Structures are given as C-alpha cells and as structure tokens.
Image (spheres, rainbow, N blue to C red):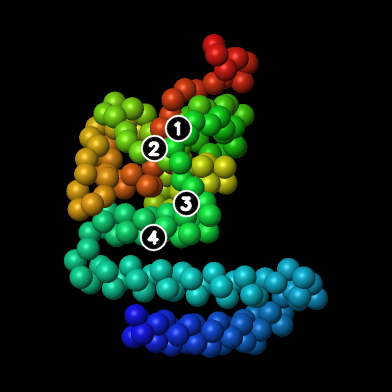
Amino acid sequence: MGKLQEQLDKFQDTTGAAYQEIMEALEDKYCWKCPMRSTSTNSHCREIHSMKVLQEALDQGIREKLGETGVSSVLLESLILRTAKKRFKKQGGAAREKTIIIDVSPGQNLDLDPGTQLMVKINPRKIREGERIMIPSESIESSVLGVCALMMGFPFRVTVVERFFHENNFWYVEVENGKIFPLESILGVLIKVIRKDQPEGG
C-alpha cells in the first residue's frame, strides 16, 4: 500500500499544480475581459471551470488508457458507472431499487407532453424481456445514476428490452438494433404513464 499511496500523493501534488496553472491561464487569457469579472469572487466561475476541465481531462485520460488495452466501449462504460456507484456509496448514498413518480420536464422527451407524470422503477436490480426502459437519448460521457438523471431533466427515450444478461461480472441490457447498455446506465423501468388529468390509480 505504501507504493500506491506514494503514487497517489504525487498525483495529488501534480493535480494541484495543474489546477493553479489553469486558474492563471483563465485569468490571463479570458477573465480580464469578462463582463462578469467584478462578481467572479462571488460566482467562483474560474474555480468551477478549472475543476470541470481538470476532471474531464482525468476521465478522458483513463478512457484512452483503457481503450489501448482493448477494453470495449460497453465494458468501459460499465467500469466507469461501477466506480461512480461506489463513490456515491462511500459518501453515504444508497442506490436502492424503488418506485417513484416524476414529472416530465419540457424537452425531456418529445413523445410526452410536458407535465406528464411517469411511474418509474429506478436503480432496478433486474430487468425482464419486454419491459419498457428509459435510456439517455444521447450518448453522455458521464452517466448519472437513476433518479439523479431523471430529476435533473436528462433527455431520455423509451425502448423495449430484448435481452438481459450477465457477462464479465456486469449485467447488461440489449435493446433494438442490438444496442447494449450497462444495467447502471438505465435511467429507469417505465411502469406507467399517468396523464395530467388521470388519477394515479386510474
């Protein structure tokens, strides 16, 4: 563990130095002409942007390195999602399977009227063939687990499960056209669409 900690300490020092350099680069090249400059100490936009691009660079570096070793894109997504799940759990979160009702926000799904309510099972442990599931409508580099994505208004589309299978220690869902998704990337199982003028039990 000593060697690992040594490498992590070096990485932390390097990251801190890179963060400071990004902050200075933003200040020198962009911030001085920004109309929001006078309020930047309150908005912390420079700090937020620096953290964002540094995290994106780290994620991309890991993706590229794993890709060089022949890891498939689906397995790579599974690894990233499993890592995110463990991070949430370490911070006290719990990705439990449960049924919720959500409101569809404008633009979230083109087939549903804004304000339509959906009964959804989030963080499903298993999915059956023929069930309707909600998946991101576009490829996203950093998937957000279950209810987080839905509540944040992530665009989604509904598709039907053709196969649910286990491979290389991960569960996968296959949908139309042979497209395969890691189980953790499924936003939810669509149980029921509740019209605005329809009672929940109707």
Nearest to N terminus: mark 4 or mark 2: 4
Q: Is residue 83 above or below residue 156?
A: below
Nearest to N terminus: mark 3 or mark 2: 2
Q: Residues within 10 Å of mark 3 (few under 14, many from 20)?
A: many
Residue type marked 4: Thr
Measured in 3D between alpha carbons, the distance from the residue under mark 3 to the one under mark 2, in whole angstroms, is 14 Å
Rendered image: mark on residue 83 = 4
Residue annotated with mark 2: 124
- Return the x and y of residue 79 as percentages of the image width and height: 32, 59
Query: Residue 99 versus residue 61: which sits nearer the camera?
Result: 99
SS at circle 1: strand
Residue annotated with mark 3: 144
Q: Residues within 10 Å of mark 1 (few under 14, many from 20)?
A: many
Residue type marked 2: Pro
Rendered image: mark on residue 121 = 1
Tag nearer the camera, 4 or 3 = 4
Measured in 3D between alpha carbons, the distance from the residue under mark 4 to the one under mark 2, in whole angstroms, is 17 Å
Pointer 1 and pointer 4: residues touching (CB < 8 Å)?
no
**Quadrant of res 165:** top left
**Quadrant of res 105:** top right
Pointer 1 and pointer 2: residues touching (CB < 8 Å)?
yes
Q: Is residue 175 above or below residue 38?
A: above
